Image (cartoon, grey):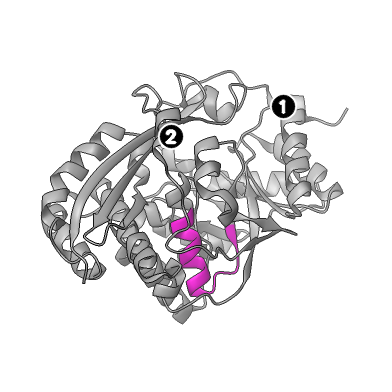
Amino acid sequence: MSRITEIRCVLLSSPYADKDDPEIKECFPNGPKRTIGMVEVTLENGVTGLGEGYLAVFAPLVFKSIVELCAPQVKGKDGFDIARRVRDLRSLCDYWSLQGAARHVIAAFETALQDAKGKSLGLPVYDLLGGAKSDKIPIYGSGGCCDAKEQFRREFDQLAGLGITRYKMRSVKTDILRTVWVLEEAGKRGVRVGVDMCQNLADPPQAVEDVVSFVEAVHARTDQRMIFVEEALGPDCPDEFRELRSRIDVPVCGGEIITTPKEMIERINADVYDFVQPDASVMGGISAVMDVFAAAGKKETDVIVHAWGGAAAIMASYHAAFAAGGKLVEYPMLAFPLGAEMIGDQGRIVDGELLRPTATGLGLTLTPDMEARYPFDETAVYSCALIDFGPPPDSYWAPA
């Protein structure tokens, strides 16, 4: 046993991507900077742990307020009894946020306790979960927020430097020639491409017929084939996802927005997706992702963890993947210096595979100097307004 003596909310903002990246133009009206929100727990043995909730990318002050509400519920209690602390937090939050924002915050607490416990015992977090099932996991590059050919080529060069041969781009249903161009260009380099259709923020989302038409139109123009379509429909459309699976010959995936293992397991059992994409910083922590892996294994459904937050979010999902025998993980390609600095050499990629981290806990570094260099900027938030920045017409991507 080691009691929780201190809880601190840490909000930091770092340069992110490039001002010319479409994600910045569309979703970051105040420029290329992104905020992350973490919980730091201190145990009575002096060890600290870090965890992250994805909510802070969008609403950092809401994240901070919920952390402050939750802190008294667990302070002074046993930090090694992580399941009990999660139940404590749920008893406080489930009435008003059974799903959604509070689950992101609970994820930060749960992950921070995993990190602190691992460091206290001298073990990587995956060893707390039964041990790593492999020494390396294949990884795919997650980028494709590009509206110029040269931007895509830079990302392909980045993949080549890491030996990565799988890639995810972002496309909407009108991006037919653009998607064909990327599939063809990637194919020349031995890279296979999946497509994120970005419907998590769409209101109303596109219909099954839209996705079918998109896939058919793209595949009619190239011999290259998409290796998956992600979030092709709205987040509350499980029946439509199942219908889509029956109508296209491309694997259908999703789940990064699901905030409870119960809901994701229900979707697994209902054959909604070909594979699922849980995120530890969204779903309630590392143990929640482990629950998803266990349920998916019974249905022979693959689990490919989502990783798009800061360092603690990424490493939490990676440790779950190593502990559960994950076959593929996501590598966010847009530059985020704070995340890279915190992860250091614990996120090494060699020949297209993520090497098993070896440090205790999650393997993160956060120093006072780093906090001083990445101060919180209240304007550095992800806007869901989806600004129309005037991307080039699809004809730009037509063959010369």
Question: Where are the magenta residues, as a range?
Answer: 315-329
Mostly what secondary structure, the magenta segment?
Answer: helix
Tag 1–tag 2 contact (CB < 8 Å): no
Could you tell me the amino acid type at mark 1?
A: Ala
Along the polypeptide, which appears first: circle 1 or circle 2?
A: 1
Asked if the stretch drawn in magenta spans residue 290, the answer is: no
Instruction: From the viewer's side, name the closer residue of 44 and 108.
Output: 44
Q: Quadrant of the N terminus?
A: bottom left
Density class for disc 1 (Cα within 10 Å; few <14, some 14-19, many ≥20) is some
Residue ID at (55%, 43%): 340
Give left or right: position of 193 versus 142: right
Could you tell me the amino acid type at mark 2?
A: Asp
Q: Position of residue 21 (x, y in %)?
A: 61, 27
Residue 234's place in the image compared with 58, above or below, is below
- From the image, tell me which residue sits under label 1: 148
Within the image, what quadrant is residue 174 found in? Answer: top right
Q: Quadrant of the C terminus?
A: top right
Q: Can residue 281 be seen in this view?
A: yes
Instruction: From the viewer's side, name the closer residue of 189 and 220.
Output: 189
Q: Where is residue 219 in the image (x, y as percent from the top left)?
A: 74, 49
Instruction: From the viewer's side, name the closer residue of 120 and 247.
Output: 120
Instruction: From the viewer's side, name the closer residue of 123 and 16.
Output: 123
Q: Can residue 232 be seen in this view?
A: no
- From the image, tell me which residue sits under label 2: 369
> What residue occupies the far front of the structure in this picture?
45
Q: Is mark 1 on a helix, strand or loop?
A: loop
Query: Disc 1 to disc 2, how far (Cα)?
Result: 37 Å
Give left or right: position of 101 versus 91: right
Within the image, what quadrant is residue 185 found in? Answer: top right
Q: Is mark 2 on a helix, strand or loop?
A: helix
